[in-house]
Every structure is written in structure tokens, then in C-alpha cells.
Amino acid sequence: MDRRSFIKSAAAGAVGAAVCGRRHAQAATTDSRPNILLLVTDQQSWRMMSCAGNRWLKTPAMDALAAAGTRFELAYATNPVCGGSRFSLETGRMPQVAKINNEWDAPDGQVPPSVFASGLGSLFHAAGYDTVYGGKIDLPRSYRDQFAGLAYRYFEEDERDRLAAACAAFLKGRHERPFFLTASLINPHDICFLAINAYRASLGQAPIFDAVDTSGELAKQVRNLRDRAAFFEKTCPPLPANFAIPSLEPAAINDKVLQPMPYYGAFRAWVRKNWSDEDWRIHSWIYHRLTEDVDRKVATILAALREAGLERNTLVVFTSDHGEMNGAHHLEAKEVLYEEATRVPFIMSFRGVIPEGRVDGSHLISTGLDLLPTLCDFAGIPLPAVALDGRSLRPLAEGHSPPDWRRYVVAESWGDRMIRTQRFKYCKYTSGAHAEQLTDLAADPGEMNNLAELSEHAATLKEHQALLTEWQRKTWDS
């Protein structure tokens, strides 16, 4: 059976089972292990929730989940692009293990065999869980067939409305054993197409989009407004405080990220140069609306969890694969090591186990490294006998503070590296001027001032250089 046939038959079987399950009472099970519900959005920065203090949108489902558990404010993706980050979320490994570097896909054969057997899906499947996955995958080619065919029952390919409905049907269905359900939702990722299509329009080319033109439809609403002045005065988010381009910005950002992409062209450089302040603000307004859209999908899934009576036996984890620049430094999209692209929301809720309404603003979290050991900890699944650099977040989520928590987290992009400590952030680029970047995030949260070339910060720079060297030696990162 080829992959497409497998997906279709698996989807039909899952939907049929869900419909059948609704005709029966929830099956009792003697297995006391918790269910796992993993909710992953795409391209959602950590600020994009009203519970995070953003007054330009309303995210009641995400807010309710945070109120019912612990929200981590210092959570970072291992790579600010889909493929690299999602590889880490599934495997607990850094993207460089699969040679995911400046490409969004790893060459066939580059994922070590041990990774196939020690990913989240394989571990939970081997432990007797019903491992079910719906929505976006975006993993290396050599991993996808193992992922969808062996580790998971891939039951819904749609990333939008059908996915939320299918997850709700599954949750309300009959469960003979504990489940591990992943809902991989696409938005607010559709914001990508706004800049791409603005660039294409400048060339006289037709717009492109992924399945539905959501960002284009929202842009049309703005164009058709009768009172644009009132819109910009009262409704549209302002430009970010760090909208300006830093004077000592690493040249690698221009040399790598802003270069033309196959098929899409030089849209990033074009919008950075040509968009007006109003264009950037409209971009932000659309990004906020797309985040509200995915919040409604999350609400559908969480409502089904409550209606099925599963809240007290289900650990819910909410996160995103990476963030979105949203106008910071005149940038949109991702791939850079700035906070807006690397820092993501991370919420854990488990009724009766995780205290309600906690906000952890002090512990550094690596979502891609820590998710696997965390879920295994709650499920009582032994960790695989391979080198993992993440840690279980269970003690933190339950309100404890381990004395030996990590000093820093690491992210990768385009061969470049980021070290984030409690106060500072250090980035090392492989080429170009200003190849080292040091920021005091306590004094400069917008990353406008590069301290790496100032003599008074030489000791701090040396300390962070040593931390990066330590990490590279420890993880065989060449």
C-alpha cells in the first residue's frame, strides 16, 4: 500500500471508529496511565495569546488552558523553521542530528536508525498507547513513512476545520486503552502568503496559497474598509517597539535568510525594503486574526475533551513549532534567531495533578528537547537508551523547582547557533560582518543593541562563547 492509500484508508477507519464510538458509552479501562493530548500550532510566537498580555487579540481557549495549568514564558524551539523544530519535537534531538541545516528537509538516509525507534510515536506505540496523529507532519522524507505507517495512526491529513472536528470525534469515541493524540494545526502559518503574494503582485504574478487563501481574504477585508483611519487608530496593532533594523545586525541574516528562495523568490528582501508602515501593521492585524482562528480550533478539541469526561485523566500540552517575526526588525516569517522567531508558547494542563493558574517565568525550556522526556515521565515510559539532552518538565509543571536546572537553551538555524541564558543571549554566525551577537535581554528585550563588539562586555561574551563550545562538545555538534 502506498502512503497516500494508507492515509486514506487510515482516515476512513478512524472516522468510522469515531462515529461508531459515539453510539456507545465511554469504554472503561483498567489502564491507569494518563491519556496525552498534544496541540501544536504553526508559527505562533509566545506573545500571541491574550493571557500573555497581548490586548490585540482574544484567545479564550488558550487562556482557559493556561488558567487550568502552568504556562512557561521562557520556552524556545530548537530551530525557527517547521522541519527542524518538528523533528526535535518528535525525537528529542537537535536538528543537526539529521543534518537539517539551511534546508527544510534532510537528505534521505541522513536520519540515524536509532532515531526511528526512539521517537515519541514509536515509544508510546510500543508501550501500548493508541498513537493517533492528525494534520501537518513536515518531517524529513526518510522519517515520514516510519512516522505515519508504524509509529502513528495518521487519521486526518487536513490541517484546518476537518482536523479539529476529527479530533473531537475521536475524543468522544470509544477508548479501550490510553491514547496519545497529536493535533497539528496549520495556523497562524498562513500569514506567510501575505508577503509572498505582495511580492508576486509587484511582478504581475498571480497569488499562491495553501488550500485556502485565508491571508488574502483578510487583506481584502482591510482594502474594502470604509474608514481606514479608524481602523488604524483603534483596531490595528501598532508597529512593534523593535521595528527598526539594528545598526550592528549580523550580515548573515541578509546573506542567508533574505536571499531568493526557490519558487517563492526574493519576497523577504522585497517587503523589508518596500512595505510601508501601514503594510506592516496590516500584516500584524492579519497575523492576530489567524491566531484567533486557530484558537477556535483548539476550543473545539478541548470542548470535546470535556464532553467526553476525559479532563481528569488527560495531560494536555500546547505549543507551537516556532514563532513569527511580525514586523520586528522589518522582518516577517521565521528562520532567524531573534526572540520573535525562536520563542514559543508552552502550556501544560492536567486536572488534579498540575496546579492551576501558574506562570513559570524563570526556567529555560527547550520545547524540542524537553517534550519527549516530559511525556514519557507522565506516562511511565522508560526513556530510550540513547543520548538525550532534554529534561522532564513534570517537576516544574507541578510547582517544584529543581536546584540543578539548566543554565541555557540552544537553537540552530542555517548553521548558526544561539545560546540563551537567564539574562543574555549569544548568537554565533558562520559568515559575514558582526558574526557574533550578544544581547542583554533584561535591558534590551527587543534585541536592538549588539554588545559583542563592546570591550566592557568582553567577559560576558567570553562566558557565552565557552557555553557554546561546551554544548558543541557535549552534543558532537560540528
Image (tube, rainbow, N blue to C red):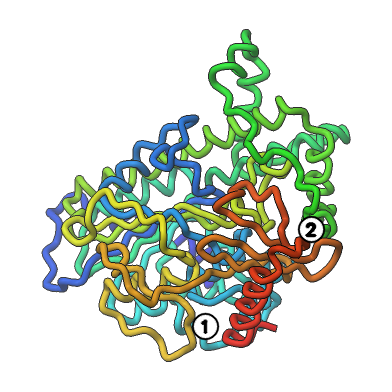
Please tell me whether mark 2 sits on a helix, a strand or a loop: loop
Residue 412, by quadrant, is: bottom right
Q: Residue at x 53, y 37 (%)?
A: 290
Where residue 419 sits: x, y (%)?
60, 68
Quadrant including the C terminus = bottom right
Residue 319, by quadrant, is: bottom left
Residue 173, by quadrant, is: bottom left
At label 1, counting other C-alpha atoms closer than 10 Å, the crowd grade (few under 14, some 14-19, many 20 or more) is some
Specify the farthest residue to the right.
203
Identify the residue under disc 1. 115
User: Between 391 and 99, which is closer to the camera in this rendering?
Assistant: 391
Mark 2 or 1 closer to N-term? 1
Please tell me whether mark 1 sits on a helix, a strand or a loop: helix
Where residue 181 sits: x, y (%)?
35, 61
Position of 256 with respect to 421 (left or right) is right
Label count reads 2
